[in-house]
Amino acid sequence: MKRACVCVFFSLIFLNRLAAQNRYIIQLRDKGSSTFTFSNPSAYLSQRAIARRLRYGIPLDSTDLPVSRLYIDSIRNAGNVTILNASRWLNSVTIFTTDVAALAKINSYSFVVKASFIAARTSATSGNKSGPVFNALPNARTEGNGAAPFNYGNSFNQIHLHNGEFLHAIGLQGQGMEISLLDAGYFQYTSLKAFDSVNKNGQVLDTWDFVNRENSVVEDDTHGMECFSIIAANIPGQFVGTAPKASFHLYRSEDASSEYPIEEHNWVCAAERADSSGGDLISSSLGYNIFDAPLQAQSHTYADMNGNTTLAAIGADLAARKGLLVLISAGNEGDDPWGKITTPADADSVLAVAAVTTAGTPAGFTSRGPSSDGQVKPDIASVGVSTVLQLPGNSIGTGNGTSFACPNIAGLATCLWQGFPEFNNMKIVSALRQAGNRFTTPNDTTGFGIPDMRKAFLILVREMVSSSLTAGPCQNTISFTSKDISTMKYEIERKTASESSFTKIGEVAAGGAVLRIQSYQFKDTLVNVGAGSISYRIRQIVDTSAAGFYGEYIDTLTVNLATPCITTGIDPLGLDPASITLLPNPAYDKVTIRFTSQEAIPDLLFRVTNAKGQLITTYKRQKRAGAQTFDITLATYPRGSYFISIYDKNRLLATKELIRL
């Protein structure tokens, strides 16, 4: 009896000490007595969230069902208890109480697994806290953005490191996509100039503060606002973000005045709201390892960085399982004793982002990998050194940190996915990893490296390409489908049995004002080609600009020619061999093209390329039968060698070299 009294005495001491700490996490045993069902998901998921699950074949499971209302009401009614946040994914509730009896009662409930101390006190709003030292930038315009659709100003280099302007140029600027930011606050975003377009166009769809449980997030920390600006800014000539036309959910999960495990629980609750509200992507520049007193004992170890242990990592992987694309800053511990990534960057289904300069040099402070279970971490890298961002004083400046690398690439990832809604989040993750400059030799500093958005685009395009080859008498027809826009083109190359290398035999111009899947045909008339194997390659040129000419092979086809196709100089299509003369050549300010063919050509196309094969310009003309002349002005052409190629639609008729003096 005396032993039992002692146990009760110490239990009361323990509960009194717990109650003095104020905030707890209540882990629940199940979701019993739930009024929610799988047959009526609209009761707890938005139509957009349901559509995502249907599009990508994601089944509903128990983690989608909200926490039992009966359980929450029982906890609330146990005494002087305030419900903070409930997590459906973790099946847990955080509470505030100083009521010892209430805590004891909650612990006695059969549906409660345990109640654990998770934060020392209730924090007041953090306000505009001081942070890293930032540098202000002048308002001067930065030129040299080429054919990019925006005058990016000072932010051009942080976008150009990934060739991100390519996505913007083909119309992928975030339209129709929803990005959820999870951070410590978005101080004054409603009145800062980087967000003029966002505010005017109503691009902020949802806000919630999981720390203070209110809608407003504008009076809190500046960190989230700075990250937000890197994606959303639209100040032409000074600062343009990586997805300026996306829509946004702004969630405050972090209490910047302290560091306790409750913030990980808040993070998971915010990720759940990103999911249920229908978001596409999470960008979060938060990480956890060491907690403040008196909760140092709950601090994480490197062994915990295995993607399966911490609340935040479990939540991040669940967000990915629900179909969201999740990007997390790797951490700024590279110069500290910890050195490694922080959680939830260790989650295996997220992209952990390291920091590099605009020249691609890794930052000394960027956290290193791998995860403790041997995953390649970080996954990718972006600009986190002197990253251009909005400052709270309504000036544009720069800052350092993986916090800023994460939103920079998150915005571009959003634009990439916008172009390929056919693919799920993990296909986009794979494409971004494969597009990294270290994909074949990943390391512990930048992982798979710095993604190139043009390469990522073509990786996804190749997943969609289909092609076939139909052989006829001395004419092969190549049919293919791909995703493109009118600024692109295709080059067709051929290698016969007698040739050791491929030769370009024609081009196909892409059509369509918007990015979409399209079908094409190319007919190759065989002249003086011997019997044997003939191979064709299709090269899609996605960037035809002189400054950024870029393409890759998307498919290869082979056919066997049973009998040779020998001619006596007569064109099998009924045309005399075409001839082209350039006068003068070399030329200075103008060249006259004299072109001869037997038949009229209503869709004559001139393509001028430089010595590297980069397209300089095109001209469309109509041609009558016989000889005809055409003039081209050369005043804007730099000195050098050029090639003028003439096509009848897709068929190459003649090519001639031109020297510009």
Image (cartoon, rainbow, N blue to C red):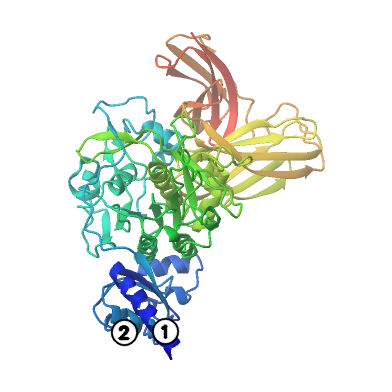
| Residue kind at label 2, given as amino acid type | Ser
Report the residue marked by disc 1: 111
Comparing 268 with 157, the one in front is 268
Position of residue 557 measured from the top left corner of the image (x, y, whole percent): 69, 45
Q: Is residue 172 visible?
A: no
Q: Residue furthest front?
A: 2
Considering only order in the chain, which callout, 2 or 1, is on the residue closer to the N terminus? 2
Q: Residue at x 24, y 41 (%)?
A: 194
Q: Residue at x 22, y 64 (%)?
A: 214
Label 2 SS: helix
| Residue kind at label 1, given as amino acid type | Phe
Q: Residue at x 44, y 61 (%)?
A: 298
Q: Which mark is residue 74?
A: 2
Position of residue 31 measured from the top left corner of the image (x, y, whole percent): 42, 81
Label 1 SS: loop
Q: Are marks 1 and 2 in contact (CB under 8 Å)?
A: yes
* Few, some or many residues within 10 Å of mark 2 (<14, 14–19, 20+): some
Image quarter where the N terminus lies is bottom left
Position of residue 55 measured from the top left corner of the image (x, y, whole percent): 47, 65
